[in-house]
Amino acid sequence: RKEVEQDPGPFNVPEGATVAFNCTYSNSASQSFFWYRQDCRKEPKLLMSVYSSGNEDGRFTAQLNRASQYISLLIRDSKLSDSATYLCVVNDNYQLIWGAGTKLIIKP
Amino acid sequence: DAGVIQSPRHEVTEMGQEVTLRCKPISGHNSLFWYRQTMMRGLELLIYFNNNVPIDDSGMPEDRFSAKMPNASFSTLKIQPSEPRDSAVYFCASSLGGGPNTEAFFGQGTRLTVV
């Protein structure tokens, strides 16, 4: 079993819709969690950290469920510019463990 | 700040040749990471330095790969001899502190093609 697992997608979503995807992790002692965004042929960039109580940044909401060992990312009112690959990252004993990413395509 | 700087951006080389990838981390960052990304395997950590010292190189595929960090502002990843299966995008990233909530900043990557 992979340490961090994501549905690779692609998720094809109409503009304006809400989309959510999850990421599961295997180590219950993992300390912190992040969502990164990677555009085609570009480097990954931090989208948001994921806090225990859940956090929101504009149209983006991240949540952590420690009991079930997953984190989620919700995007509301999706824009064409949200099309990208979203990478889930888990900090495991001070090392970043990366998911393979979920590809999101927003269609006009 | 210029961010993490990698060179070259693109490299095409023949099988068997030596390849050297270079990275300049963000000034003041004390952790540096080399990653490899392919469609098949996603983003893989190759090696991680903290204060110029290699901490974890378990991701280095084999002896053909080596990495050095002679000082806080420069690191190299060398492949000798290169093989077609080494074709990938190689990213360097740096972070401050390496603690649990540390953000990693990536360079633009080196796209390596071995023919």
Image (cartoon, rainbow, N blue to C red):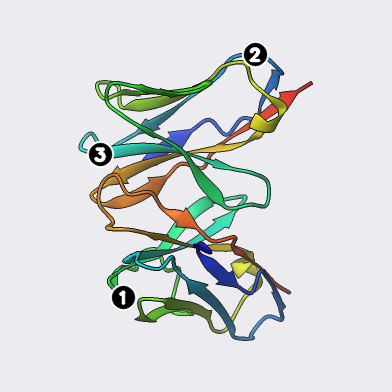
The x, y position of residue B29, in whole percent, is 35, 64
The x, y position of residue B113, in whole percent, is 69, 69
For disc 2, the chain is A
Looking at the rendered structure, the kind of residue marked 1 is Asn
Q: Is residue A72 visible?
A: yes
Locate residue A54: give its quadrant: top left
Q: Residues within 10 Å of mark 3 (few under 14, many from 20)?
A: some
> What is the residue that sits farthest to the left in this orientation?
A29
Task: In the rendered view, tell whether residue A75 sits above or below residue B67.
Answer: above
Looking at the rendered structure, the kind of residue marked 3 is Ser
Name the image quarter holding the C terminus of chain B.
bottom right
Q: Residues within 10 Å of mark 2 (few under 14, many from 20)?
A: few
Label 2 or label 3, whichever lies nearer to me, is 2
For disc 3, the chain is A
> What is the residue that sits farthest to the top in this orientation?
A17
Q: Is residue A1 visible?
A: no
Nearer the N terminus, badge 2 or badge 3? Answer: 2
Gap in angstroms between the C-alphas marked 2 and 1: 46 Å
The x, y position of residue A46, in whole percent, is 47, 43
Q: Which residue in the protein does label 1 denote?
A: B52
Element assignment for label 1 = loop
